Each structure stands twice: as structure tokens, then as C-alpha cells.
Amino acid sequence: MFSCRPLLLAVAVVLVAGCSFDTGERLSKQALGTVLVDGFSDAADGWSLGETRYWKARAGGDSVEVTNTPLGTGVSPVWFSSRPGGDFQLLVRAGIRKEGLDGGWGIEFGARDRKFAYRVLVYASGRFCLDRLFDVYPEFIHCIPNQPEVEPGTSTNVLSVRVVGQEIEVKVNDQHIITFSDDRYEAGELALAVAGAGTSVRFEDVALVSLE
């Protein structure tokens, strides 16, 4: 959860400074922003939970569990019900409960129809991948086997995606992985993602901060 020093409270929106994500103090927020989402306590309202042929997602107290079915051989997105607008930072802490075929999890952001979107994933093998999606099909633009910042197996990892304008920064466990710009990127929607048939992931915490 976010722990914050509140500066202004208005209709459930808190303007914060010096907030820190509760991950053993490994990851902290450095910029002022408005907290839009703090934890999974209202997950049923905030995320597209349910069940399809490919995945099922359910709220469990202060967490969300997503499991890919045997048919879910690709990457299954569980979409956030609101659009973050412009500049934002999304922090997610999760761990794999059951490793399926090439199991992993991550964050997807951009166009929901995947005409143009990005996806960052960490895998049980210790691999990190950044994919760019054009017309559904992924382009693997940054894929590192045995990424040292990724905790392998069923260990917990924290992903951070920070988007300011068309500049995108990605961190894993507060370690910088890549920063890049893409003039084709437009503000879109956000999703939690699970990769691999039979993979089950417990999303333990989330924080979405508007940097507008």
C-alpha cells in the first residue's frame, strides 16, 4: 500500500509528497502526484474481474488472483476500469503462486484493442521483456534472459512504469531497466497481465499515481 504525507484531501483524492510503496522500502515515489488507486481493497469495482475461456480473475481480500486456463497460452490482460489520463506512474507488487508454461506477469498500457500498446513482463525464469504491440502482435524490443534485478521462481517482484508525455521509464524492484521515448505513444488504458498456460499470480499491491 502507499504510505503518504497528505497535503490536501478532497473527495477521496490525496495530493501527496514523499510517498513510499510498501515493498521493504525498496521502491519510493519521487514526484508530487495525485493517488488514484491505493491497493486492491476495491478491486471488484476497479478491475475487470471475472472468467473467460483463457483466464479467471477474482478478488481475495486485499489482493487479486489471476489464473490462466490451459487454453490461456498467451498473455491475459485484466483491465483497469478507468483511464489514467496523461502522465502517470503505476506500481505493482506480485508473485507467481503456480508456474505454468513459461509463466510470468506484468503490466500492459496503451490501446485496449492493442493497435498500439506496450507490455512489460517478468518471468519465473528470471527473464524481463518489454513488448510493443502493433495490431495485436507483439514485437520484442527489449528482452533480457536472467535479468539480475528479477527475483526468479515464486518470489515477489515489483514493477514500476512511469509515463511522462511520450517518455517511458521501467523499473524492476526499484532498479532502472530502461527509459525510452516513442512519439507514437498515446495515453490509453492499463491492465494487469499474466503469461503462460496454467500460470497463477497473486497481485498483492498496486498504486496508480497521476503526475498531471
Image: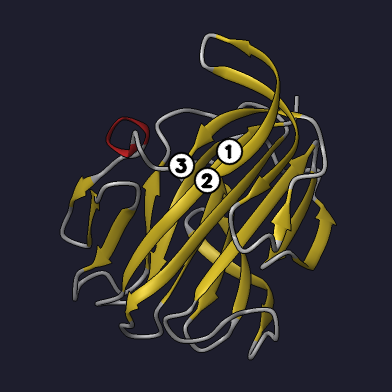
Q: Disc 3 marks which residue? A: 39
Give the mark toward the camera: 2 or 1.
2
Mark 3 in CB contact with mark 2 (< 8 angstroms) = yes
Q: Disc 2 marks which residue? A: 1
Mark closer to the chain start, 3 or 2 = 2
Identify the image's colour scheme: rainbow, by chain, secondary structure or one colour. Answer: secondary structure
Query: In the shown orientation, is residue 80 left or right of residue 169?
Result: left
**Distance between mark 2 and mark 1 Cα atoms:** 11 Å
Residue 186 vertical placement versus 96 (above, below)? above
Give the mark toward the camera: 1 or 3.
3
Question: As shown in the figure, which amino acid type bears the numbered disc 3?
Answer: Gly
* Numbered disc 2: secondary structure: loop
* Numbered disc 3: secondary structure: loop
**Distance between mark 1 and mark 3 Cα atoms:** 9 Å
**Distance between mark 3 and mark 2 Cα atoms:** 5 Å
Question: As shown in the figure, which amino acid type bears the numbered disc 2?
Answer: Met
Toward the viewer: 71 or 126?
126
Query: Residue 201: x, y in percent?
Result: 35, 67
Query: In the shown orientation, is residue 41 left or right of residue 51?
Result: right
Mark closer to the chain start, 2 or 1 = 2
Query: Residue 169: x, y in percent?
Result: 77, 55
Query: Residue 35: x, y in percent?
Result: 61, 29
Residue at 39%, 42% (x, y): give it: 40
Q: Disc 1 marks which residue? A: 208
